[in-house]
Image: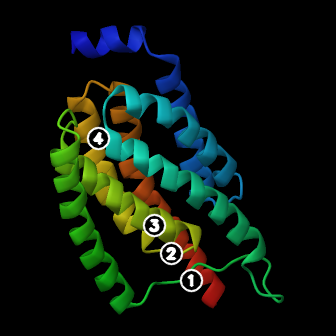
């Protein structure tokens, strides 16, 4: 506990900014607010520095995908709606899509974990790092195209990241992802209500 208190009193500016931008991005996402995307981009830029220094290379690579998907999501939420729609509606992914996504994610996790172990021997927690990375890519894509199923992926990722970042002494990020667990549940509930309202 003393270690955590000492850490918080000497918090790195990048981690503090990551906490702020990350929380704002998720809060705006729950509200289906377009501001989720610019704050998501700011979060990504800060995270590049943090994960490189922590030698979490898959998390670093993940943020490159995040950058692309944040830009795509921003574009899709503006231009992806039909002429008679005020905004892009929330929808479910098909069962087959979720099965394929899960299977592909599983294979990608094993492959990335193996490659990290082989070519980046200083990589920390290569298979766990790969798991959060691949599942986050899947979740981020589903978020960008406004599929409610994205929250399933984020819940799993948030639980894993909370533990991993605490283990790596990235306490602010651990706290952030601990909060994300609750926000993922709240996000699913809010999006489900919104989807039901759309149907009605």
Between the C-alphas of marks 4 and 2, the distance is 25 Å
Whole-number angstrom distance, CA of label 2 to CA of label 1: 6 Å
Q: CA distance from mark 1 to mark 4?
A: 31 Å
Which residue position holds label 3?
A: 188
Tag 2 and tag 1, C-beta contact below 8 Å: yes
Foreground mark, 4 or 2, reads 4
Residue under pointer 2 = 192
Element marked by disc 4: helix
Q: Which mark is residue 162?
A: 4
Which badge, 1 or 4, comes first in the chain's sequence?
4
- Disc 2 is placed on an element classified as helix
Picture disc at residue 196: 1
For the residues labelled 1 and 3, say whether their Cβ atoms are less than 8 Å apart: no
Residue 97, by quadrant, is bottom left
Q: Up-down: is 187 above or below 165?
A: below
Which residue is pictured at 33% across the width and 40% down the height?
Answer: 57
Q: Nearer the viewer, mark 1 or mark 4?
A: 4
Residue 84 percent coordinates (x, y):
82, 89
């Amino acid at each position: 506990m003393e270690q955590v208190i000492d850490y918080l009193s000497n918090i790195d500016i990048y981690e503090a900014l990551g906490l702020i931008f990350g929380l704002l991005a998720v809060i705006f996402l729950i509200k289906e607010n377009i501001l989720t995307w610019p704050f998501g981009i700011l979060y990504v830029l800060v995270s590049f520095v943090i994960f490189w220094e922590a030698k979490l290379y898959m998390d670093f690579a993940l943020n490159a995908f995040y950058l692309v998907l944040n830009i795509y999501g921003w574009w899709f939420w503006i231009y992806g709606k039909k002429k008679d729609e005020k905004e892009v509606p929330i929808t479910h992914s098909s069962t087959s899509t979720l099965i394929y996504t899960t299977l592909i994610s599983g294979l990608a996790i094993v492959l990335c974990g193996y490659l990290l172990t082989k070519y980046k021997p200083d990589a920390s927690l290569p298979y766990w790092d790969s798991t959060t990375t691949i599942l986050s890519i899947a979740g981020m894509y589903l978020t960008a195209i406004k599929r409610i199923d994205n929250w399933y992926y984020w819940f799993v990722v948030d639980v894993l990241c909370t533990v991993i970042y605490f283990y790596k002494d990235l306490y602010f990020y651990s706290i952030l992802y601990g909060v994300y667990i609750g926000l993922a549940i709240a996000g699913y509930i809010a999006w489900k209500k919104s989807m039901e309202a759309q149907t009605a």
